[in-house]
Image (cartoon, rainbow, N blue to C red):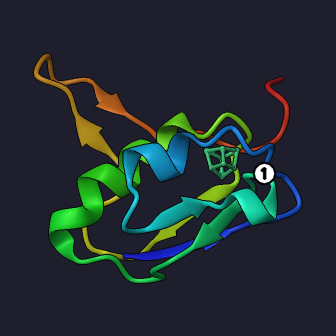
Amino acid sequence: MEVSLNYDTCIASGNCGYIAPDIFQNLEEHEGFVSLRKEQPSKSEWPAVQRAGRLCPSGTIFLTGGGEGQDEEEEPDGKVERPRSRGSAS
Ligand code: SF4
């Protein structure tokens, strides 16, 4: 898995640094805007990174690679939760 950010869209909510502090940080000296600590998280870190990506309110976090199902989570009822898409819903 590789993590990338669109720094232009971050609104400094702090969710990502709270959820996955080894990957993201929201430093006071950067006014809480996101910084990336690790571009390639270990497999054990993927769940937190995926959760941070889903809960980012501005769609700033992008996850690529990492194998099948990396960007999807199967719910117990068989539904698949897809990552947030960017842009307006239409
Ligand atoms: S969760 Fe999204 S909007 Fe909030 S600080 Fe992280 S990247 Fe920025």
| Helix, strand or loop for disc 1 | loop
Q: Nearer the viewer, residue 27 or 47?
A: 27
Task: Give the residue drawn at x 48%, y 82%.
Answer: 39
Residue 13, percent across and down? 68, 38
Q: Is residue 69 visible?
A: no
Q: Nearer the viewer, residue 39 or 22?
A: 22
Name the image quarter holding the C terminus: top right
Q: Nearer the viewer, residue 73 or 39?
A: 39
Left or right: 30, with 64 as reference point? right
Residue 31, percent across and down? 81, 54
Which amino acid type is marked by label 1? Answer: Cys
Left or right: 90, with 33 as reference point? right
Dividing the picture into quadrants, the one containing residue 33 is bottom right
Task: Give the residue drawn at x 27%, y 61%.
Answer: 46
* Total marks placed: 1
Dividing the picture into quadrants, the one containing residue 22 is bottom left
Question: Outermost residue, front direction?
Answer: 29
Residue carrying label 1: 10
